[in-house]
Each structure stands twice: as structure tokens, then as C-alpha cells.
Amino acid sequence: MSSLFARTLCETATWTRLRALMLAPVLLAALALTACGGGGAGAQVQPPANQACTASTCGTLLVGLTDADGDFLSYSVDVVSLSLETANGRVVQALPVRQRVDFAEIVDLTELVTAATIPNGTYVKAALTLDYANAQVSVEQNGAPVAATVVNGSGAALGTVTVDLLLDNRNHVTILPGRPALLQLDFDLAASHAVDLSTTPARAVAEPFVVATIEPVVDKDLRVRGPLVSVDTNASNYVIDLRPFDHLSARLGQFTVATTAATAFEIDGVEFEGAAGLAQLAGKPAGTPTAAAGILNIASRTFTATDVLAGDSVPTPRFDVVRGSVIARAGDELTVRGATVVRRDGSVRFFRGDITVLIGPDTKVTRDGGGRNLLRPGAISVGQRINAFGQVTATPTVDTLTLDATQGRVRMKVTHLLGSIVDAQPGQVTMDLFAIDRLRPSAFDFTGTGSSAANDADPAAYEVATGVLPVFGLLADEPIRVFGFVTPFGVAPPDFVGRTMVDFAGIRAVMGVGWGANGTAAPFLSMGAAGLVVDNDNPDLGDRHHIKIGPVVVDITALASAPTVAPASAGPTLFAIRRGDTVEVFREWQPFVDRLGAVLGGGARARAFFAHGRYERGINTLNANYVAVAVQ
């Protein structure tokens, strides 16, 4: 991240940290978390009955879940259990309830999913169990979501899958009273799947790849959700009963959320800031639903909210909710695609058809970042990611649904652009769009976005106002990421107001290599402390042999020399080897390389290889913070 330049416009001083959003695609999940104690975030839950915990014999572990951008628009599966095991074989459960999770919905943050009180000890193994029996998976094809089935290598549908994780000496989880522990699990869907779009439905051939570490490799904002327990205005914090995702009844431990004078609140559709917002929250009854996003301080184990939603500003029985991207607008009718629908009865599903959202002059409009925006419905334009609150007025089918938000509200969410630079001048960057929040530009109808038809947004020359963000050094054709909000409908140009930018040097490069169903005995030309040299002339190479830097794809078979994957010299690192249903994880490079050499030397064949980090074209080297190798 040292080369990342990310600056916030002066008008958004209360803006949430977006470092996590700037890390590019490939890893698709990370059970991430932290146990927080002391004056910051704290958690207490009832342990499983067989643990017989007391204050002196048990400690706390917080577990969260996240995802990174990948090939899936939705990926809903059941997370059944998470267990930990000590060296002497004692096994404890850390996930008290089954969780339905759409990994594709949590690309940009980490969701705190449970707090577990477990016996003191040093845990050297973990196991994650997933149930695919009712999985709902979608991928994009020609700009539209299509269904995909998840199968194993033999083509049979997946059922219950358990992945065992062996933790190296630097990754052991130590539980002590009064000292919460930290565990991160990373379910790498890119390394776990090969997606075939030639079939109907599409097929995702899976061998789940999960890794674990006590130090997160990817730094993201944290989200915590659950009903309100109490508010302490003097201490500037409040306590919730943790209830992740859209779970109706779980109470997975009390958790304390700290606030500051800059914390943005939205309560029942009305915006407040700092102490005024906390005072409003104090007036709400216990049980009021809340959701907070903010920063988890790993060293101090404290959580501070930058944004807080409460009351019917989060899904409640009062409203049906649609979460997705506006792909077209005609008058007061929005067309939303790639959306998740949360019904008032608590049911949740990804909707592959387009959704019509009706708005009107009484629709309240707010946006992430607070600031008492006082926005009008005209602020919502094509490309904007939204949460719409209203009433479903048409019986939903597989392909159609209408939400009436004329007496409801719309919250504009931070929107993510990915593309390449056409031109960069002080105050403005022109982009050739590759995607808007994972949807290709062909999915959007930009008619009416401009002040005249001639000024309608052009995805090949998409104009982004950058304000005081630095543009010096941005070069044509290089990839760029921008985060912000679409310009109000009928006002462009500019087409977009950027709040944060990530240039070429800051965009994480991802290498993906596959060697077919039978793998290869010699994936690397050399292996050692200096790195792994990938054989780009290997005759066993399959369809996947690339380095991706945002929208730029480099075919490694076309490179003049074999690329090197070397350990990153800065930042946390994580390296993993998957054999069958067991994954070994390492924090340090040399033990990883030694073990990989022994595994391959023993007759195993490499099937897939993924790495992410910073790619230096001049020396053809990817300096990797993360490497995953699947062998058979």
C-alpha cells in the first residue's frame, strides 16, 4: 500500500476509511476477526455446554467474514461450523449458529459474525464446514446475471464440505482470559473455482480453498450489526447484541461500538453527527436494529464506528429492501440489477432479474458519509449503487419485481469504478470504464444522465471530477480505481464525483495459473528464498495463465521471460498449500517454500497457483503478500 495514493476531498472529512476497497480482486472470502476487550469492543457469549467455562478458564475469540472481488455476482452458502483444535486433540466450536452468507455482498468490508467464549489454550488446527445443498450462485454473462451450479471435479453437486487447516507456529491461536484473540480465515474462491460459462446453467467446479492467519493480509473496514442493548453518552459508545447479516433471531455476544465527534449517524432516515447522533440513539428503545461500519484497531483491540445506521434505516419489518446498482432511469422509475432483496418477513435472496424501483418527491435520499445531505430524488443516477426501502407491489417471480419507494427512502452507497485512464488533468480524470461495481458498462443505459443528449455519460470517456485529489503522474492506458458517487441525473458532465482514487502502482496485481485436471510435476523453473519462477512454457498449462492489474490482463505465455513470484518485503504475508481437504498455512516464506518443495518432490502435482501483490513490469516480478498453491 506504500505506493497507493488515496486522498479524501475536503468536503468529506468524515468519510470512512477505504483502504480495503482499494485492494483488487481475487480472494473471495475471509473469516476475519478480532476479539476486542477493555474499553473498546467487548464480547461475551454463552459457550457450548460441554466447555464449562468460567472467567478464569476461558477467553474470547471474535470471528468475522469478508470477501474479495471475484467472478461471482452472488455466492450464497451456509457456513455450518468453525472448530478449533489444540495439540492434544481438544476440539471446541467457535460458531454457535448456522449462518447463511452471500460472500459476494461483503467484498468491501468484514462482517463480524460471532463472538465465542472458548477454553484457554493454544489452538493449532481449525476446520470450516460449508453446506452447498441450497447454494445460490450467480455469475455475469454478457452484462446479465445468470445462474451457476457448484460441482466437484467429477461434475457432482457439492453437499457438505469440511476444510481442515493446519496452522504454523506463528499462526497458533492463543486464548487467555482478558486477552481476546484474533483469527482470520480466507476462503479463496478464485483459487477454489474454475467457472465454465458454456453450459446452462453455468458451472463452477469447486475445490474449496481456505487459509487461516492471526494477522489479516487484507485490511478492511469492519461492519457490526445487531439490536441495541444500551447507550453510554458519557463514554461515547453503545452496546449491541451481535446479529450478523440478516439473521432474524441470533444473539451472538454483546459488542461495544465506540463513536467520535465525526461519526455519521442515520436514524429512521434522518441524519446526525457525533454526540447529537448518539443522543438520538439513546432515545431509541432496546432492541432497535443497528448497523455500524468503522475501523478495528488490531493492536488495541478497539472498534470505532465511522457510520452508524439505526431504526428503519436498516432492514426492519417496516420496509422491503432492495440492494443493487441502478442500470437505467426513466423519470421516477429506476431499473436495478445485480440486487439482493430483503423482505419484511426476513427472507433474503439474490434476484437475477431486473428490479423496478419507484421513487417520487417524498422519497428521502441520503448517502454514505453523512453530512446531513438533504438530497432530492434527482440525485440518483445511472451507475449509482443504492439501498432502496419501500414496499414490494408486484408478486416477485424469477424475473420481475417492483418496489415502491415513493413513501420510503433510498440510501446512495459508495460506488466503485474500474477502468483505464484516457486523460488526466487537474480536477478531472477521464476513464475508459471496465466495470461499475462488477457490472460491465454494456449493462447500463446512460440515456438521460447528461444535461443534454450530447452530454450523456459515455463509458469510453467517463468524466470523473477529482477535486483536490492528486492526478500528477497518472498516465494514459494505465488502470485506475475510483470510489465516490454518480453525478445527479440529468446534470452530467462530470459523470462522477470521485472521493478516492487508486493508481496503477497501488492496484493489487493477481496472478492465476492452472495446469489442468492432471496438474504438472514441474510448475516452477526454480524455487528458493528469492522466489518461485513460474514456467510459462510448461506444456501442461491450462486455460488460466495470466496476471491481472485491474482491467489489464497480461498473458504470461506471451512474456519474453518466465515471471518470478517473490515474497513481499512490506506488509503481512500469508502462504498456503492445499492437498485434498487439508490446507497448511505459513506466515513466513522459507518454511512455505521448503514444504512446497518437499510436497512436489514427493510426487504431488500442482493444479492451481494464485498470488497477489505488486507487479513490477521492468523486472517481471510479482512481490506477493499472498500465495496459494493447490496440489494433488
Image: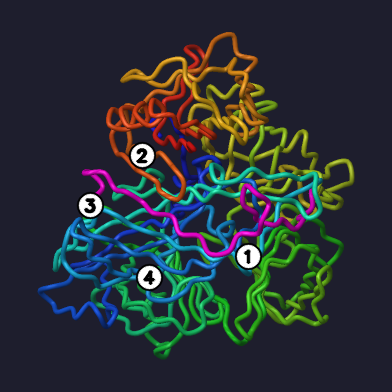
First-in-chain label (3 vs 2): 3
Q: CA distance from mark 3 to mark 1?
A: 37 Å
- Element class at badge 4: loop
Whether residue 370 appears in magenta in the rendering, the answer is no
The residue beneath circle 1 is 135
What residue does disc 2 label? 574
Mark earlier in primary sequence (4, 3): 4
Q: Amino acid at mark 3?
A: Ala
Q: Quadrant of residue 225?
A: bottom left
* Magenta-span inclusion, residue 152: yes
Specify start and end residues of the magenta stretch as a single range: 143-172
Q: How far from the left and from the top, in percent, is residue 591?
A: 27, 31
**What's the mark number on residue 95?**
4
- Pair 4/3: label in front: 4
Q: Mark 4 or 2 closer to N-term?
A: 4
Mark 4–mark 2 distance (CA, rounded to whole Å): 24 Å
Frontmost of labels 3 and 1 is 1
Between marks 4 and 3, how big is the CA–CA gap? 24 Å
User: What colour scheme does the image use?
Assistant: rainbow
Q: Earlier in the sequence, mark 1 or mark 4?
A: 4
- In this orientation, which residue lies closer to the viewer: 328 or 254? 254
Note whether residue 280 is visible.
no
Alpha carbons under labels 3 and 2: distance apart: 19 Å
Confirm whether residue 357 shows in the render: yes
